Amino acid sequence: MAGEAGSGALRELILVVAVGLAGLLLAVVAAFAPWHATPAGNAPAGLVELRSPGDPGSGPTVEHRG
């Protein structure tokens, strides 16, 4: 049965592999390309801390009762 597969199946398999490799390449480029644009050029990558646990202005205060 596998020997009966024609060149159409081979073309489809090559197309699937090519699309998969193109997607993987785009994912790698998106993951490792510098994307922090500044007027002076690309900023170095670093840790971004959104809020600090000790910062009183970091969010709404919720009173815990219980």
Image (cartoon, rainbow, N blue to C red):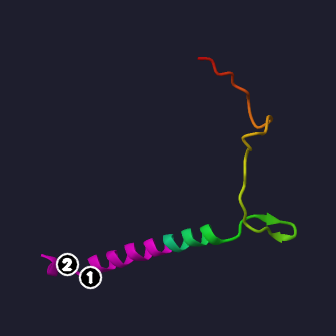
Q: Is residue 21 left or right of residue 62?
A: left
Residue 24: where, in percent of width, then height?
50, 71
Q: Mark 2 Cα within 10 Å, few/some/many (few <14, many 20+)?
A: few
* Residue at 87 percent of width and 67 percent of height: 39
| Three-letter amino acid code at the position of disc 2 | Ala
**Circle 1 — which element?**
helix
Image quadrant occupied by the C terminus: top right
The residue segment tinted magenta is 1-22
Residue hosting label 2: 5
Q: How many marks?
A: 2
* Residue at 73 percent of width and 47 percent of height: 50
Q: Which quadrant of the figure has residue 29?
A: bottom right
Residue 34: where, in percent of width, then height?
71, 70
**Circle 2 — which element?**
loop
| Three-letter amino acid code at the position of disc 1 | Ser
| 2 to 61, vertically: above or below | below
* Residue at 78 percent of width and 39 percent of height: 55
